[in-house]
Image: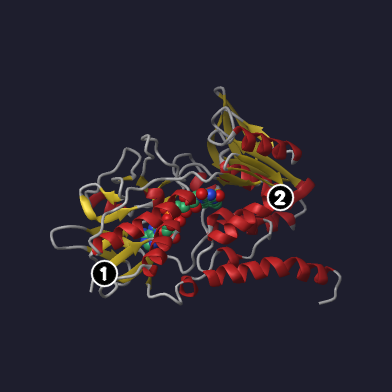
Amino acid sequence: MTRVVILGGGFGGLYTALRLSQFPWTDRPPEIVLVEKHDRFLFSPLLYELITDEVQSWEIAPPYLDILANTTIRFLQDKVTDIEAGEGKNQVTLQNNGTVSYDYLVIALGGQTPTNQVKGVDKYAIPFRTLSDAYRLKEKLRSLENSHKEYIRVVIVGGGCSGVELALKIAARLGKRGKIRIVERNDTLLRHLSPFNRKTASDALSKAKCWIDLETEVVEVKEGEVSLCYKNQIDTIPADIVVWTVGTKPAIPPSLANRLTLPTTLDGKIEINPYLQVFGMPHLWAIGDLAACQDEKGNRLPATAQVAIQQADYCAWNIWATIENRPLLPFKYQPLGEMLALGVDNATIQALGLPLSGSLAYLARRLIYLYRLPSIEHQMAVAFSWMTTPLTNLLKSLEVV
Ligand SMILES: Cc1cc2nc3c(=O)[nH]c(=O)nc-3n(C[C@H](O)[C@H](O)[C@H](O)COP(=O)(O)OP(=O)(O)OC[C@H]3O[C@@H](n4cnc5c(N)ncnc54)[C@H](O)[C@@H]3O)c2cc1C
């Protein structure tokens, strides 16, 4: 039986597996194996909402066993430590389950936040990428909220989407007690976004009294303080929490990076052809944050869920077409727009040429993400929860239930 092994159960890997399992096959369908180190999928665009308790963790992080329950996909919870390709040795090595051979392989292991580039970041700063990062940040906030401190000082490093969305959620949670500061090394925040989204976000940050340090770099983080460099002057300021949202590097296991001769770019991403296949290795596909993918004009596509989900559709199709001897499709990226949460009950959207902000944008963003959640069963469970939770909370506050 033909076996397709998919490494990484994020937006690239999980969505490829789900698509592939839905195609019609002339002969026996291939065995689809999804390998992922965690037991739960994470819908990261809604991770910020955990900080303000606007969502519950089961809603944005459903277990794989639930998502895959009505499919033929085999789930292996394990960590990939090595990949071999070619010379009749097509296999991946897993930390606990030995080796798994494959006929076709999808590498979709995503990215990591580098925390070793500035002194003290790995020890004293909190990254914001995984569920455990969000729990760690929430716990730290909770213990500071229960302390006698008059103010809670939070320094957020990075003025991209993650930094700005997080700053506004933390500001909403802490209210007047919060002193939030965003540190950005460039001369503007959100420099890749449309002017409308940038302006709406900037207004929201002013309203929430977030302090912005532009053209400023973090040079060291220590317990309770952070050192900043602005125009060659170093200033050390107190900080109860430092959140590190800067950078992303491919999550390729070190043993793999050293041994497997995959073509990579200078920043370590895997080079792929227009069919999303690894250059020179037509039975290997690489998608998502770890693949260097370009649009038709040769511009590098951003590391976003939007890109990974669209790649998953093409990747699934091209694997199906390879097995069924059909023509492959070159990947065509359709930019669908930008959305940003701006605290609670506020967001900004620029999509299809239409700008939208405020409560309506907040609601639209929620509905779009609801539609993007994996599996219809999970979408329905979350929709029900989002409709009933406000009512339950109201009744609880009136002490009716
Ligand atoms: C807080 C946050 C907010 C974001 N918001 C947005 C947004 O609003 N819009 C947007 O478009 N994008 C957003 N992104 C970016 C988006 O999440 C990523 O671009 C997207 O997840 C990339 O998909 P992927 O499949 O490449 O990687 P991932 O979704 O990260 O999946 C990779 C998977 O591989 C697994 N894995 C890694 N290494 C191993 C290993 N060795 N063995 C086994 N499994 C492994 C990981 O556990 C993970 O589940 C956000 C990211 C973050 C962190």
Question: What amino acid type is highlighted by mark number 1?
Answer: Arg
Q: Is residue 381 above or below residue 152?
A: below
Report x, y in % for residue 6.
34, 63
Which numbered mark, 1 or 2, is in the foreground of this view? 2
Q: Mark 1 = which residue?
A: 3
Alpha carbon separation for disc pair 1 and 2? 46 Å
**Element type where label 2 sits in the image:** helix
Disc 1: residue Cβ within 8 A of ligand 1's nearest atom: no
Residue for point 33% across, 55% down: 253
Residue 107, visible in the rendered structure: no
- Residue 368 drawn at (x, y percent): 59, 55
Residue 300 figure quarter: top left
Q: Residue at x 52, y 46 (%)?
A: 336
Looking at numbered disc 2 in the image, what kind of residue is underneath it? Leu
* Closer to the camera in the image, 346 or 254: 346
Say what secondary structure mark 1 lies in.
strand
Quarter the N terminus occupies: bottom left
> Residue under circle 2?
360
State how many labels appear. Answer: 2
